[in-house]
Amino acid sequence: MQVKHILCPVDFSDLSAEALRYASGLAAQLGARLTVLYAEAFSAPAYFTGSELAQLEQQFRSSFRKAEEALRGFTGKHAGDMPDVRVIEGLPVDAIRKAVADTQADLIVMGTHGRGGLKRLMLGSVTDRVLRESEVPVLTVRGGRTV
């Protein structure tokens, strides 16, 4: 398998920074492109009035721009050359699938907390869902080692 494009979803955690460093190094070694993705869902409460919703949407657009700036800073700190960065509004798993299709990524590199049992059941796992649902290979990074 030849890897031409790597997608690295991040959540600004230390673990995602480690996955980003790994993805960046791997992209450099393979001569592959790297796209770094941050996704956040926006959902207004049903009881908001029209004016409250308009104000909330304006705040969201402002925070979206700040997220792009933060992602560029985070990426610059943890990945050598500045790869493509994308902030997508949506649930993380859906956004990752969409980004894979949009960028034609052929590998996903992402961190995993490695939770099991009740913690995993209670918190869910974006990485677990991506592993199960992805049509491209997924390389997970867990606390200083790959799994």
Image: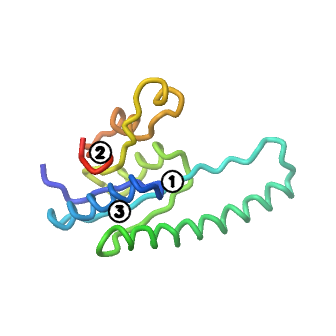
Q: What secondary structure is marked by label 1?
A: strand
Measure the C-alpha gap from mark 1 to mark 2: 18 Å
Q: Nearer the viewer, residue 147 or 102?
A: 147
Precedes in sequence: disc 1 or disc 2: 1
Q: Amino acid at mark 1?
A: Ala
The label shown at residue 26 is: none
Measure the C-alpha gap from mark 1 to mark 3: 13 Å
The label shown at residue 39 is: 1
Residue at 86% across, 58% down: 51
Number of residues whose C-alpha sits closer than 10 Å to that of mark 3, classed few (under 14), some (14–19) or many (20 or more): many
130 vs 137, left or right, is right
7 vs 32, left or right, is right
Residue marked by disc 3 = 35
Q: Amino acid at mark 3?
A: Thr
Residue marked by disc 2 = 140
Precedes in sequence: disc 3 or disc 2: 3
Q: Residue 19 lies in what quarter of the image?
A: bottom left
Q: Residue 22 lies in what quarter of the image?
A: bottom left
Residue at 59% across, 70% down: 65
Quarter holding the C terminus is: top left
Q: What secondary structure is marked by label 2?
A: strand
Q: Which x, y percent locates residue 28? A: 19, 67
